[in-house]
Image (cartoon, rainbow, N blue to C red):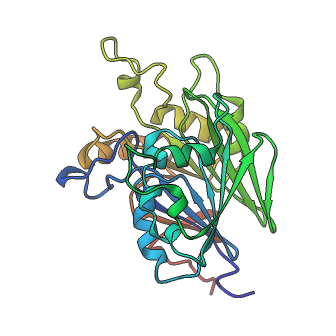
Amino acid sequence: MSSMQNQFTVHFWGVRGSIASPGAETVRYGGNTPCVEMRVGDSRLIFDGGTGLRVLGQTLLSQMPVNAHMFFTHSHWDHIQGFPFFVPAFIKGNCFHIYGAVAPNKATIQQRLNDQMLHPNFPVPLQIMGADLKFNDIEVGQPLEIGDIKVETALLNHPGEAVGYRVNWQGYSAAYVTDTEHYPDRLDENVLYLARDAEVLIYDATYTDEEYYAERTSKVGWGHSTWQEAVKVAKAANVKKLVIFHHDPLHNDEFLDKVGEQVAQRFPNSLMAREGLSLQLLPPHNGQPLESGEVPQVPA
């Protein structure tokens, strides 16, 4: 098996939530909205199409023709706003299999991506895209198979609904759980199901508990969770590596540094998501996924 086929990598192109937040105070973690790429065997999986998708698209121009599978959690703006600027989708010869659940108002993922590109909101319609776009309406709870890759789905607690994903391959797994709000009296069974024994859990920790429960500026009901809840899930689900994701646009680099320190005190095998971060699930390094830049130790 070639090195390209024997891989399970997770790369972060956009890690910010709600709205892009470029600027001097967000340089280290990044200001692009959600987009996570997984290279699994010889397949490319892309999760969400926030502004980070535009950046990914630029790198793919040197790798054409591109065949990829794109999974959308939902269609709030921060998760789809990069799609109209995804250059590979405009180029013939590329192929994108696009997955999403039907929204509560019965709109398919194709309808929702199409609608954001209609006049007067955008000058170029989806129909101009020259790549082969294959849209798939998923039934949440029913696993999807892409060759020998199994993708599991579960409904998340978010206004207008969202879908969480778990990618399984050769005994390794990565869970992508955003956007979701925790329950006040219990851990979410759907989240625990997706996160169970995962090598990597990517979790929506937009707020701190202090922000979430603040009396005058409460975020209860907004559809997002906290890093404290992320730690609870990671421990309960026996997660190997926790990645804090979907950073609030008001949280600058210094703030996120402090959050990262607090998370690490409670769950040492944790990381703050940042643009450019890569995790390598194969081969395992002392039972933990490798972060970009780490070198696996070879036994003497």
Q: Is residue 232 above or below residue 84?
A: above
Q: Nearer the viewer, residue 288 or 276?
A: 276
Q: Nearer the viewer, residue 1 or 151?
A: 151
Residue 40 in percent (x, y) is at: 67, 69
Classify the position of the N terminus by image quarter. bottom right
Q: Residue furthest top?
A: 215
Q: Eyeballing the image, is 183 above or below 102?
A: above
The residue closer to the viewer here, 97 or 209, is 97
Answer with left or right where residue 210 lies relative to residue 37.
left
Residue furthest left in the image: 24
For the point 70% across and 80% down, the residue is 5
Q: Is residue 200 left or right of residue 250?
A: right
Pick the residue in front: 167 or 296. 167
Residue 17 drawn at (x, y percent): 40, 42
Split into 4 quadrants, where in the image is the C terminus?
bottom right
For the point 64% across and 27% down, which residue is it? 187
| Residue occupying image coordinates x 61% and y 31% | 161
Q: Where residue 226 appears, x then y in whole percent?
A: 46, 32
Query: In the rendered image, which quarter is residue 262 located in?
Result: top left
Q: Residue 57: x and y, percent?
A: 46, 69
Could you tell me which residue is drawn at 31 percent across and 48 percent down?
Answer: 257
